[in-house]
Image: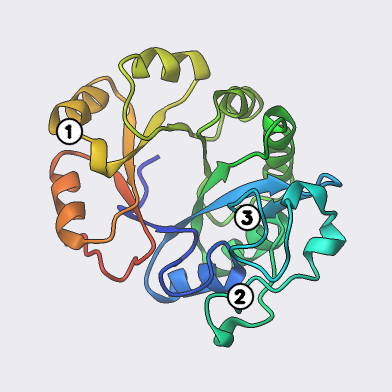
Amino acid sequence: MKGPKVIGHRGAAGHAPENTLASFRKAAELGARWVEFDTKLSRDGHVVIFHDEELDRTTNGSGRLADKDLAELKMLDAGSWFSEAFRGEGIPTLDETMAVLGELGLGANVEIKPCPGREIETAEAVVRTLKAGWPATVPAPVISSFKPASMAVATRLAPGYPGALLVGEIPVDWRRRLDDLGCTGLHCDAEHLTREQARAVLVAGYALRCYTIKEAAVARRLFSWGVEAVFTAYPDRISVE
């Protein structure tokens, strides 16, 4: 993938409630061409867009997302915690999100963020849903995960989609891990990346993308090192000129 340099983190999470359709629309309004979001499974096996294990931080619900059926999740308010202007914003499904991406012409990094013990099941459901409904008008999605088991499933079932392993600090055996998982890219925490590490990843032929950037100066430094893209909750702050 050679996509845009700026990818909206959970949409435009600095301006709208994360992982909601409103956040994806805001990212497009601010000029983002790609967004990133997290995928999980409801208790009854539907792929939804959500980050945390617990519902409490970003909805008016409580308890574990994995213990709720889709119908229960759809009753929750996932917007008013951020601002009253977003009251009534819901937890979207992956199908609903793909429809909006097609409408807006947004590419996406789809992170598989499984609830504990559902690494394989979640990856299978995400890939199945992507294959069935990904908009033909936007580029193939990048699939990423911190979970090796999820990435192994994703790259096996969807070899045509770029796969990226998510890490905090880049581990010593990063190349073996990427090769074993069939990944074409590495996503890491920018705070821990060095110029030498960036060069090694790039020379080896892998895409390198960094999260989560707040300042334009940091993004410029990373781009000068050859980093392909940065994830940011504020896509309006970072110029690629």
Q: Disc 2 residue type? A: Gly
The quadrant of the picture occupied by the C terminus is bottom left
* Residue 170 found in image quarter: top left
Tag 3 or tag 2, which sits nearer the N-term? 3
Compute the Cα span from label 1 to label 2: 37 Å
Q: How many marks?
A: 3
Compute the Cα span from label 3 to label 1: 31 Å
Mark 2 crowdedness (10 Å alpha carbons): few <14, some 14-19, many ≥20: many
In the displayed structure, 241 sits above or below 124; it is below
In the displayed structure, 60 sits above or below 85; it is above
Tag 1 or tag 3, which sits nearer the N-term? 3
Image x and y of residue 202, in percent: 24, 28
In the displayed structure, 200 sits above or below 37; it is above
Image x and y of residue 158, in percent: 62, 30
Residue contact between numbered discs 2 and 3, judged by CB atoms under 8 Å: no
Please give the residue where the numbered disc 3 appears in the rendered image. Answer: 50
Please give the residue where the numbered disc 1 appears in the rendered image. Answer: 194
What residue do we see at 37% from left, 48% from top?
3
Question: Of helix, strand and loop, which one carries label 1?
Answer: loop
What residue do we see at 75% from left, 70% from top?
76
User: In the depicted view, which residue is nearer to us: 55 or 46?
Assistant: 55
Image x and y of residue 183, in percent: 46, 25
Q: Disc 1 residue type? A: Thr
**Does residue 235 appear left or right of residue 164 in this picture?**
left
Mark 3 crowdedness (10 Å alpha carbons): few <14, some 14-19, many ≥20: many
Please give the residue where the numbered disc 2 appears in the rendered image. Answer: 79
User: In the depicted view, which residue is nearer to us: 199 or 1?
Assistant: 199
Image x and y of residue 213, in percent: 29, 55
Compute the Cα span from label 2 to label 3: 12 Å
* Residue 49 found in image quarter: bottom right
The quadrant of the picture occupied by the N terminus is top left
> How are the colours assigned in the image?
rainbow
